[in-house]
């Protein structure tokens, strides 16, 4: 955790029970929103020892998949309007999806409309390939992303 937290007392919700899934043998690369949610729900918030699910930053309903167009859309809601970690959260989501899902999907990540003071700027950063690549090349930022992705897997 960092000192000088922007949201020192976030509302923490209980984790939902995981649903056992049966693999569909003829759905090779097909993905669904629940599969995506299961892969990203445990990402740790950059400021707190809680997952994105526990902070209600992310929900099953905030993920849509269009198989025909090969698109994944994730909308997340920062805990406060002036969340300084919104771009880091979005970067964590993108990094996790890049590692877990087929590369032919176009992934769009946005903050929920009206949920962030700098919504347009955050959305632009999160969906610009060059900015994302540059951010993931920064050793300090990459370490923070890795800590958020792997803290619950140990």
Image (cartoon, rainbow, N blue to C red):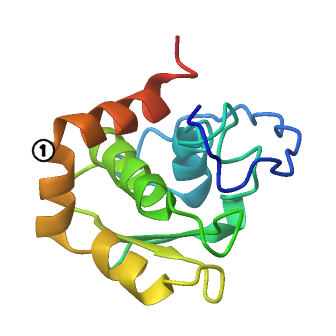
Q: In which quarter of the image is residue 22?
A: top right
102 horizontally vs 67: left or right: left
- Residue pushed farthest front? 4
Q: In which quarter of the image is residue 141?
A: top left
From the viewer's side, name the closer residue of 60 and 55. Answer: 55
135 horizontally vs 22: left or right: left
Tell me the residue at 70%/36% (across/down).
50
From the viewer's side, name the closer residue of 15 and 21. Answer: 15
**Percent position of residue 41, x then y:** 62, 43
Number of residues whose C-alpha sits closer than 10 Å to that of mark 1, classed few (under 14), some (14–19) or many (20 or more): few
9 horizontally vs 114: left or right: right
**Percent position of residue 153, x then y:** 53, 18
Is 19 rendered above or below residue 69? Answer: above
From the viewer's side, name the closer residue of 34 and 50. Answer: 50
- Determine whether the residue tagged by mark 1 lies in a helix, strand or loop: helix
Is 29 rendered above or below residue 108? Answer: above
State which quarter of the image contains the N terminus.
top right
The residue identified by callout 1 is: 137
**Percent position of residue 5, x then y:** 65, 47
142 horizontally vs 100: left or right: left
**Percent position of residue 73, x then y:** 46, 72
From where the camera sits, is residue 30 visible?
Answer: no
From the viewer's side, name the closer residue of 149 and 10. Answer: 10
Is 37 rendered above or below residue 132? Answer: above
Is 6 rendered above or below residue 45? Answer: below
């Amino acid at each position: 955790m960092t000192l000088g937290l922007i949201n020192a007392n976030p509302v923490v919700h209980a984790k939902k029970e995981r649903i056992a899934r049966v693999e569909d043998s003829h759905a090779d690369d097909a993905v669904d929103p629940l599969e995506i949610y299961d892969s990203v729900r445990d990402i740790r918030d950059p400021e707190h020892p809680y997952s994105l699910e526990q902070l209600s930053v992310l929900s099953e309903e905030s993920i849509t998949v269009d198989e025909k167009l090969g698109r994944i859309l994730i909308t997340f809601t920062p805990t406060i309007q002036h969340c300084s970690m919104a771009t880091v959260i979005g970067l964590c989501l993108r990094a996790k999806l890049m590692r877990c899902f087929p590369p032919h999907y176009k992934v769009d990540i946005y903050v929920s409309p009206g949920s962030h003071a700098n919504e347009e700027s955050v959305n632009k950063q999160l969906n610009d390939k060059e900015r994302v690549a540059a951010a993931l090349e920064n050793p300090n930022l990459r370490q923070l992303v890795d800590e958020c992705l792997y803290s619950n897997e140990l």
